[in-house]
Image: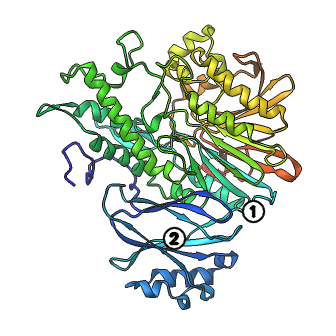
Amino acid sequence: MAHSSDSLVFRADRPWPNARLKTGAIVGHATASSVRLWVRTGRPGDFSLLLYEAREAMESPAERKRLRAAIGVAPLTTAAATSGARWPGGRVPRRIDFEIPDWSSDTTHVLDITGLEPDTWYGYAVLARDDERMLFGHNRLRRFRTPPPEAERRPFRIALFSCHMPYRVSGLFHKRTELASPEMWDYLGATLRDAEDEVAVVIAGGDQAYADGVPTLDIWKLLNRSMRREGGQLVPDEEDMLSWYRDIYRGYWGFESVQRVFDRYPTYMIWDDHEIADGWGSRHLGDDGPDDGLAQMLPDLEDRGLSRADGRVLVQRMFAAAVRAYEEYQHSHNPGTAPGLWDYAFRRGGAAFYVLDGRGNRNIERDTNRILGSPQLERLEEWAAGLDPDETPFVFVTSAVPLLHARAALVGADSRRIVEALDLGDDLRDAWEHGLHDEERRALLAVLLGLARRGHRVAVLSGDVHVSAAFSIEDDGARIWQLTSSAISRHYSRLLSWGLRFGAADDGLTPDGHRFVRHALYVDASYALVRVDPAESRAWFEIYGAQQVDPPPGYGQRTFPLRNAICRIEIS
């Protein structure tokens, strides 16, 4: 395939301060007998997934050494790799062959593996059959565990994170991209390993990558520099833009600490605005009035000799490219959905989950239901109507943008000076509390409160707002929870941090007249766990961050992961 000068395919001059993802895996939707396993091979070719049981004995040094010998010897023939005599315990690995014929999927592929045993650890490795070598699984052991049968009501944990943006720019004249705060991924991995017998679900709650996070890597700035008419054609085209979004994913996901979470625990993903563009769907693109979203996204449009109609075409091309990259890197390993739908549901251990798509159909210019759209609301209502509190006493609904968040006090007109000083206008229009979303928010709350009245324990899991917080919302005795974890690696200013604190109300009324109480607020980098005990009908929300400790003289200040949560709140 030929690539234009605008493409980032095979380009090595992007200023990434870390190695980009070349090969790797993501454990996706899992059941007691199946798993969706996403892999990236880094090149087309013929490959084999080698799958083997990896019980607790695999953790002994002797077994691990033998395993590495079995799958890491070079030159390696396919026959040797699948010989039971070479593997720990004499177990013959299951071999699943697959082909990636070309670069059309950016060498990503999803394997739907069935016939697995419940509550069992499996190890896996990927072999390139065409040149008889291991791609991964030999240098670092990869493994995952299938869930127990749904009928078994064991305690389990849900990990929640959002907003992975570990970069900042330094330098006055020569801009440099630097790492800002990626260490929270190491802490998350350590926390999950401490509790991995109970870890059932990891929810990536939005902004897993930033198309526009820092100026040096911002692909919307790249669009502003490169958009033009060439030979009568408007360029760049969608294929070039797709290469930009793929580059973003490979850069943001290139950290081994990120991969150590993705390739071990069942991870469910949903996008938010930054996988597309800041404030996507909450900007007006149709007019050039005081709230001109097109001018904000493409400020160089006129200077490049292009019309507003050209700009709208380019923006829609970017969205189409973002969709394709999102489906390749994130949605492909979620539970299956119909084409063009990105909301989905699943169950785990006595809990029902619904993951809402608040970006794919968001359109501020619609007359009603601007965030989810009417069809998605109807799917949610139908799903909720089919739930039984005896079968699924806990209900978790993921909304990337919280229904209620720490800036609730800033939404009102009394705080306009704070809003302007902190440049939060777009964020507030993005929020569920904005007046434009009153009807849709009330419809969503009616579903959630209706579930609570029927006896379900209901919690909304969110990210987006760069604050971790817990709120309860009550209406005539029915209570739901809003649990937010954000950000895991987002660099922002002390001024904004202060503003987020200042905007947090302890209690009050929602725009719909429901009583809310804030139970927790944490504004530094963090992640969260929800521990659920179905047998006891109890659950707890835990926020994790980093703590500073004072070591002996001469050792300097160091940061360590918190083995214990910063706060722990029972979800009653």
In-image side of 501 versus 299 (left or right): right
Task: Work out which quarter of the rendered image holds the C terminus and state it.
Answer: top right
| Label 2 residue SS | loop
Indicate left or right for 72 with 172 as reference: right
Depth check: give the residue in front, 548 or 117. 117
The quarter of the rendered structure image containing the N terminus is: bottom left
| Residue 180 in view, yes or no | yes
State the image coordinates of residue 182 (x, y, percent, origin top left).
51, 48
Front one among 514 and 176: 514
Q: Which residue lies furthest to the left in this view?
A: 231
Q: Is residue 457 left or right of residue 16?
A: right
Q: Which label number is shown at residue 138?
A: none
Image coords of residue 218 (percent x, y): 36, 37
SS under mark 1:
loop
Looking at this view, is 445 or 254 the one in front?
Answer: 445
Question: Residue 46: x percent and y percent?
Answer: 36, 72
Q: Mark 2 points at which residue?
A: 140
- At 82% from the left and 43% from the top, the residue drawn is 389
Amino acid under disc 1: Pro
From the image, tell me which residue sits under label 1: 149
